[in-house]
Image (cartoon, rainbow, N blue to C red):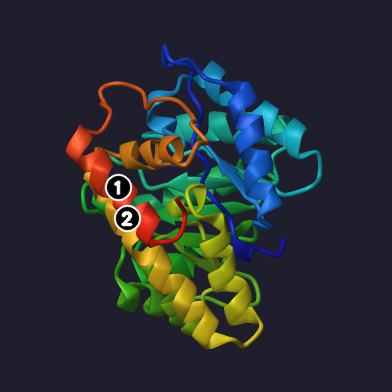
């Protein structure tokens, strides 16, 4: 599979009582696809995978695959705390017709690097699907998939890439240096570094802020791919404050607040994430206005 471009980790729309809103998911996917994203990724961190039960995950996967109907590859987050559970979720995603899976580092037990090699290898061996590693030390107790570990895992035939959300450009570069470009794609996961990562050889990004500003995220990639670095810099500059504004809320709370402010509400986050306070909503609206989205 050719893993490249802008692949948004889409939010999971919720009803007012915090139930999964599959119709809202379909509408949001259509809106993403209308902005020419290069894939759809459900059940990522932005999709609140940690707050969904297994039946909900299956329903979301099935709905996304059926609704995209070949218009876009659909990647599914199947990360969990144990290898056994990841294998079960990965087999579910394969059965439902997913194009590939993304697997985050176990986030509570702080596994060693050899344990990570064993974990990801076992998951990959359990499926025919392409597997994308997901490195996010900030949400995984500080554990990072080290470049040497990436090099070992890149030898597994169906481990095809990594989303690096470390926010450490040097780490991204070292992964790029340690893995074969022809069979292993490095995707940026820190939205403020999309252009920088592309300049060092990354093949795309999985940016949470794409839910808010797909035109800016796709603009960075397409401008860079066409050789228009100045336009890519302009898109990146406009995206920067939007990504920084995500720190206004707990978890992904500010993303859904931004969508509501833009008239594209995807409902609330699941508790305990609370709505933004009024002063933060005002600040967020100002940032969206400054980026030309309001």
Count of all numbered marks drawn on residues in the image: 2
The residue shown at (34%, 40%) is 252
- Extreme residue in the right direction: 70
* Residue that sits furthest to the top in the current view: 17
Q: Position of residue 239 (x, y in %)?
A: 41, 64
Measured as percent of width and height from the top left, residue 26 is found at 66, 31
Q: Is residue 265 above or below residue 113?
A: above
Quote the CA–CA distance across marks 1 and 2: 5 Å
| Residue picked out by circle 1 | 284
247 or 91: nearer the eye?
247
Secondary structure under tag 1 reads helix
Q: Which residue is mark 2?
A: 287
Is residue 51 shown above or below 200? above
Is residue 101 in view? yes
Classify mark 2: helix, strand or loop: helix
Question: In the picture, residue 166 is in which quadrant?
Answer: bottom left
> Residue at image x 40%, y 79%?
173
Q: Quadrant of the N terminus?
A: bottom right
129 with respect to 24 (left or right): right
Q: In this view of the protein, can residue 144 be seen by the observer? A: no
Q: Position of residue 197 (x, y in %)?
A: 44, 76
Tell me, yes or no, whether the two marked residues, 1 and 2, touch with CB atoms within 8 Å. yes
Q: Is residue 19 left or right of residue 148?
A: right
Residue at 53% x, 42% y is 10
Residue 22 placement, left or right of 146: right
């Amino acid at each position: 599979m050719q893993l490249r471009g802008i692949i948004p980790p889409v939010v999971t729309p919720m009803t007012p009582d915090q139930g999964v809103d599959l119709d809202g998911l379909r509408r949001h996917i259509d809106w993403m696809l209308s902005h020419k994203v290069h894939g759809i990724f459900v059940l990522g961190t932005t999709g609140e995978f940690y707050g969904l039960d297994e039946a909900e995950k299956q329903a979301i996967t099935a709905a996304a695959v059926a609704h995209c109907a070949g218009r876009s590859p659909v990647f599914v987050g199947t990360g969990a705390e144990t290898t056994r559970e990841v294998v079960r979720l990965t087999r579910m995603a394969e059965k439902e017709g997913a194009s590939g899976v993304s697997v985050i580092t176990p986030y509570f037990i702080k596994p060693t690097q050899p344990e990570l090699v064993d974990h990801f290898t076992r998951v990959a061996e359990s499926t025919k699907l392409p597997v994308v590693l997901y490195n996010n030390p900030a949400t995984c107790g500080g554990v990072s998939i080290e470049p040497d570990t990436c090099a070992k895992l890149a030898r597994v035939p169906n481990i095809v890439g990594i989303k690096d959300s470390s926010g450490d450009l040097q780490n991204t570069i070292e992964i790029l240096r340690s893995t074969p470009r022809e069979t292993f794609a490095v995707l940026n996961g820190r939205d403020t570094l999309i252009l920088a990562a592309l300049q060092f050889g990354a093949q795309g990004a999985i940016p949470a802020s794409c839910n808010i500003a797909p035109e800016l995220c796709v603009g960075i990639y397409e401008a860079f791919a066409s050789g228009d670095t100045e336009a890519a810099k302009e898109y990146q500059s406009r995206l920067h404050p939007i990504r920084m504004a995500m720190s206004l809320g707990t978890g992904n709370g500010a993303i859904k607040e931004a969508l509501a402010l833009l008239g594209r509400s995807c409902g609330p986050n699941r508790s305990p994430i609370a709505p933004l306070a009024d002063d933060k909503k005002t600040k967020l609206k100002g940032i969206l206005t400054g980026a030309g989205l309001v």
